[in-house]
Amino acid sequence: MKTGVGGWVALGRCQLLSLAAIAAGAVGGLVVCALLLLPLGVGFRLLPPTATALRRFSDRHRSWTVRWTGMPISPPEPLAGEGPGSGRRRAVGLLGDDGFWRDLRWALLEPCTGGVLVVVPLALVEYGVFGVLVQPFVWRLLGDGNWYAFVPVHSTATVLAALVLGVAFVVAGLRLSPVALRLHARWSRRALSAPRSTELVRRIEYLAETRADALDVQAAELRRIERDLHDGAQARLVALGMTVDRAARLLDTGRPDTGVQEAATLPLRTGHELPAVRELLAEVRALSDRALQDLRDLVHGILPPVLADRGLGDAVRSLALDSFLDVHVEARLPGRLPAAVESAAYFAVGELLANAAKHSGAHDVRVRLDHTDGTLRITVADDGHGGADASRGSGLAGIRRRLSSFDGTLALHSPQGGPTIVTLEIPCASSSPKTSSCSGTG
Amino acid sequence: MRVVLAEDLFLLRDGLTRTLREHGFDVVAAVDNGPALLRALHEEQPDVAVVDIRLPPTFTDEGLQAALQARRIRPGLPVLILSQYVDQLYAHELLAGGQGAIGYLLKDRVTHTAQFIDAVRTVAAGGTVMDPQVIAKLLARSDARGNTAELTAREHEVLKLMAEGRSNAAIMNSLHISESAVAKHTASIFAKLRIEASADDNRRVLAVLAHLKR
């Protein structure tokens, strides 16, 4: 029953594609006519609209291919002739446009390549249906010369044979249709994707943009560390030094705020300053505690020790224990991932859990981490009321920006009424499992 | 009381050794790495081990792993883990055995000598000592989930100190209240949280922690 509904759907798509192939040839023919008419001048007026129609048609093919087979086709640059301008200038622009010529080549080839491909399962099914539904009724009328495939149909027995054969044809056609669709998608990708140079230009633009983002993020991080040190531990250590100094002077002079000159003239100590010194020293200890706490928070913000010690799986478990929600973690990670990826993923999950606790009204959160086919995949699913919007919450946009440096993606699924499911994907290699004592303890 | 100490920074190792000796402990071995710690625990059979969590050679959680491994060989071996930071996951793992004789403290706490020495003694006696930060986080979580909503502010304070592993006497001193007041508060807390009261201090700590982890 594998063929089932899927086979019929695929067959329907083959039917659509076969008709579209003829249409593609026709549109291509129109464009060729326009090109041939260029010397007469009329072509200049005809070329832009026909080229636009062709592009719409090829775009439709690209979106079908993605939707039906999940095989993405990188779209070409917009047509050179688009937008305002005289017909002549637009036509001239088109003639120099790589994408236009690729579209045209595809349109002219499609009827005899992609079209033929998808017709095979169609023909099988239609011929099979003919054998099953038509032959039983017409064989008596047709007489001796009636053949169905290699079966001469002239008796009840041979009709039954034709029937079986017809069913076999239908099944074969249905089985074949998804295969034909996939092959067609491959052919479309070859014929319709943007030329390699365009893809490279696009990639370079993307890399330049994400590199700039990564540098911005890094600079912001350094600024934050600098400010935290300056306002936190550094300031506290200065205060601590001053307090120690006051305590020392108190011991020297009996008064905390006298100048050095006076101190020299007042060497006598009476002992009643001791409680005040004790108070100052308690203050010193409180200050050093606070400074240590500041440094600890800072270190945690840079690289959480549990992440450095144990890797992403246990670090996320630690996040789960910190969360006010019931967070269940399922981690299937072989060994360690690159440090930068671990860190980005950790902070992303932290942010998502914080979001879930703050906005979703959820009780349970499930976090799943796995690493397959060279991609780290993390899903964070809560049972809250949904309605999260990546464009409104700057948190999600921030995660997206950070992940983009690793070619990572964030997909948000959060319908009104919930649940919210966030999927992060980061392509990265994984090191072999650590053989040290770090793993396997409970 | 025989102590094995593991700390890789010389200054701290030296300081801790001195502090422990001043308070009548016999520091039988002071080591600076994980494998040496395991050896010392095996050879010296100490009454208590004071262990820095991050040790060579891996500089990750070597100390914790060594301590857990030693406790698998000798269940109930008293271990006090010191760390520059505390993590709920590690607290969970240390408490997972449910057998007590375990401590988990921030390294800063050693500057409060009296409390630190108390903690070593509690752990050596089979008790459980958790850093106030661990408990504060657990309590914040319990509060947010409404598990401790029925408690009064004072009971909340008492619960926190109980969970840290303090004895009634220590709670008395810390909150400046009478012994009977402490007893009254603890009884009320147990009733409200529906925890079975236990005369045994360690069982009491473990029960409170189990409740907070819910």
Image: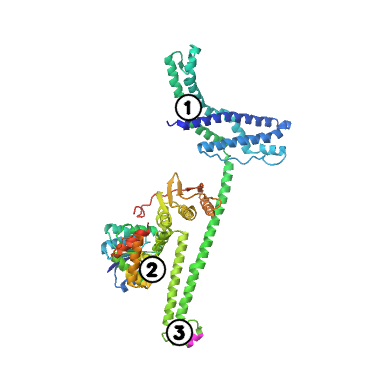
Q: Position of residue B133 (x, y in %)?
A: 40, 64
Residue behind mark 1: A173
Badge 1 marks a residue whose secondary structure is helix
Q: Indicate whether residue A262 is drawn in magenta.
A: yes
The numbered mark 3 sits on a residue in which chain?
Answer: A
Amino acid at pointer 3? Gly
Q: Earlier in the sequence, mark 1 or mark 3?
A: 1
Residue behind mark 2: B109
Identify the image quadrant of the N terminus of chain B: bottom left
The quarter holding residue A271 reads bottom left
Give the number of the disc on residue A254. Answer: 3
Look at 27% across and 57% down and name the residue there: B73
The numbered mark 1 sits on a residue in which chain?
Answer: A
Confirm whether residue B139 shows in the render: yes
Q: Position of residue A28 (x, y in %)?
A: 63, 31
Identify the image quadrant of the C terminus of chain B: bottom left
Helix, strand or loop: magenta stretch: helix
Confirm whether residue B17 shows in the render: no
Question: Which range of residues does the magenta coloring cover?
Answer: A261-265
Given residues A226 and A429, the one toward you in this image is A226
Q: Position of residue B36 (x, y in %)?
A: 31, 62
**Does A100 sit left or right of A173 as displayed?**
right
Q: Indicate whether residue B104 is drawn in magenta.
A: no
Q: In the picture shown, does residue A283 fall above or below A174?
A: below
**Does B28 sit left or right of A96 as displayed?**
left
